[in-house]
């Protein structure tokens, strides 16, 4: 199984990329995984005028291809003002111009985290609610509240046993 994972943030120290990376380490069995950095897919702000003038950027085609080449996708969403980060939304918008079915009927796990007690649950709800429109087959979701209290960035591990068990359960079902 080939799994693509990323944090939906362009922060160089993204806690969501840390969470997505950690999730990949918990996958059992024969898994070929790739964790990508959204900074490698930065492109101009989407507009129909740009698309008509210059076409779809190669970065969007590359990411769309990586999703297509994967069997499954793990995304950990950062939340800015209750919604997607501008970086993720822009990349997603460009990819949706290739095909609205951005997730290409792949199995997905949607995660989210933030430093606060709600764990980016608003953006997770938005992503989960819109997933069917973008051909994502949701296998599980999890919001991790208070990231710095529940995750050790030095070791790259969840420290909260209850949250860790929940994530492990989701990942076990993911591979079925």
Image (cartoon, rainbow, N blue to C red):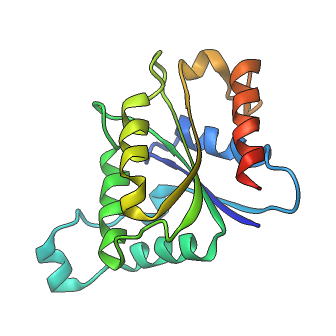
Q: Is residue 136 above or below residue 138?
A: below
Residue situated in front as seen by the camera: 15 or 71: 71
In the image: residue 58, left or right of residue 35: left
User: Is the C terminus in the top left, top right, bottom left or bottom right quadrant?
Assistant: bottom right
Q: Residue at x 87, y 62 (%)?
A: 30
In the image: residue 8, left or right of residue 20: left
Whether residue 154 can be seen here? no
User: Is the N terminus in the top left, top right, bottom left or bottom right quadrant?
Assistant: bottom right
Q: Residue at x 45, y 42 (%)?
A: 11
Q: Residue furthest left?
A: 49
Position in image of residue 104 (x %, y %): 50, 71
* Quarter of image, res 55: bottom left
Whether residue 72 can be seen here? yes
Q: How many numbered discs, if any?
A: 0
Q: Residue at x 32, y 54 (%)?
A: 89
Position in image of residue 34 (x %, y %): 68, 62
Position in image of residue 140 (x %, y %): 60, 43
Residue situated in front as seen by the camera: 83 or 60: 83
Q: Is residue 102 above or below residue 85?
A: below
């Amino acid at each position: 199984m080939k799994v693509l994972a990323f944090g939906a943030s362009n922060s160089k120290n993204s806690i969501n990329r840390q969470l997505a990376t950690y999730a990949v380490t918990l996958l059992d069995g024969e898994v070929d995984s790739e964790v990508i950095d959204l900074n490698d897919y930065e492109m101009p702000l989407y507009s129909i005028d740009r698309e008509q003038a210059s076409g779809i950027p190669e970065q969007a085609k590359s990411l769309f291809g990586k999703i297509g080449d994967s069997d499954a996708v793990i995304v950990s969403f950062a939340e800015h003002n209750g919604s997607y980060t501008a970086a993720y939304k822009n990349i997603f918008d460009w990819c949706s111009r290739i095909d609205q079915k951005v997730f290409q009927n792949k199995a997905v796990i949607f995660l989210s985290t933030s430093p606060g007690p709600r764990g980016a649950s608003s953006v997770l709800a938005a992503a989960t609610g819109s997933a069917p429109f973008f051909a994502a087959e949701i296998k599980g979701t999890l919001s991790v509240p208070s990231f710095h209290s529940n995750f050790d960035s030095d070791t790259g591990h969840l420290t909260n046993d209850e949250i860790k068990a929940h994530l492990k359960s989701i990942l076990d079902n993911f591979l079925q």
